[in-house]
Image: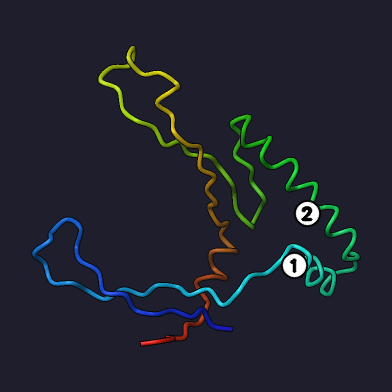
Amino acid sequence: MPIEYSLVQRANPSDAKAPKKFYATAKSTGDTTVRALAKRISDISTVSTVDVMAVLEALFQTLPGELAEGHIVRLGDFGSFFTTLKSGGADSEKEFTVGLIGAVTVKFRPGKLFAQAMQAAEFKRVGK
């Protein structure tokens, strides 16, 4: 199934006088639940849906703790999860306090095979 996209006209943020250009924006076609993923995994393996759900639940419970400990969580060819911080700035190292850290963000970097699979995706324009 192709990735659906529409076009959006945007200005150049670094040059307000430059002509606007059109850019592709991916469109969601719905959601998939963990249960649906577990069923699909069960259908292509010898593991039951219940067992897949148990493993996924264990992953969901352990992943945040690993990230909170400062670990990069590498899941082989699937990819890795890691954290980044958003913070305010200080004029000097001495003036920086932990209170300037506003948010922790979890990022995902796809592994080689995952990235290759996504690059092989087909596209379908929707809307005007």
Give the residue displayed 40% in from the left and 18% down from the top.
97
Question: Quick one: label 1, few (<14), some, or many (20+) residues within 10 Å?
Answer: some
Q: Viewed as shown, does residue 31 lie left or right of 58?
A: left
Q: Position of residue 51 (x, y in %)?
A: 89, 58
Q: Position of residue 8 (x, y in %)?
A: 31, 75
Q: Position of residue 75 (x, y in %)?
A: 67, 50
Q: Which amino acid, by three-letter code, is at mark 2? A: Leu
The vertical placement of 60 against 24, above or below, is above
Q: Position of residue 17 (x, y in %)?
A: 8, 64
Which residue extends farthest top? 94
Give the residue displayed 33% in from the left and 12% down from the top.
94
The vertical placement of 28 against 99, above or below, is below
Rendered-image quadrant of the N terminus: bottom right
Give the residue displayed 75% in from the left and 67% down from the top.
37
The residue tagged with tag 1: helix, strand or loop?
Answer: helix
Residue 37: assigned label: 1
Give the quadrant of residue 77: bottom right
Which colour scheme appears in the figure?
Answer: rainbow
Rendered-image quadrant of the C terminus: bottom left
Give the residue displayed 34% in from the left and 79% down from the top.
7
Q: Which amino acid, by three-letter code, is at mark 1? A: Leu
Q: Viewed as shown, does residue 25 lie left or right of 34?
A: left
Give the quadrant of residue 2: bottom right
Residue 56: assigned label: 2
Residue 107: assigned label: none
The residue tagged with tag 2: helix, strand or loop?
Answer: helix
Decide which of tag 2 and tag 1 comes sooner along the chain. Answer: 1
Q: Are marks 2 and 1 in contact (CB under 8 Å)?
A: yes
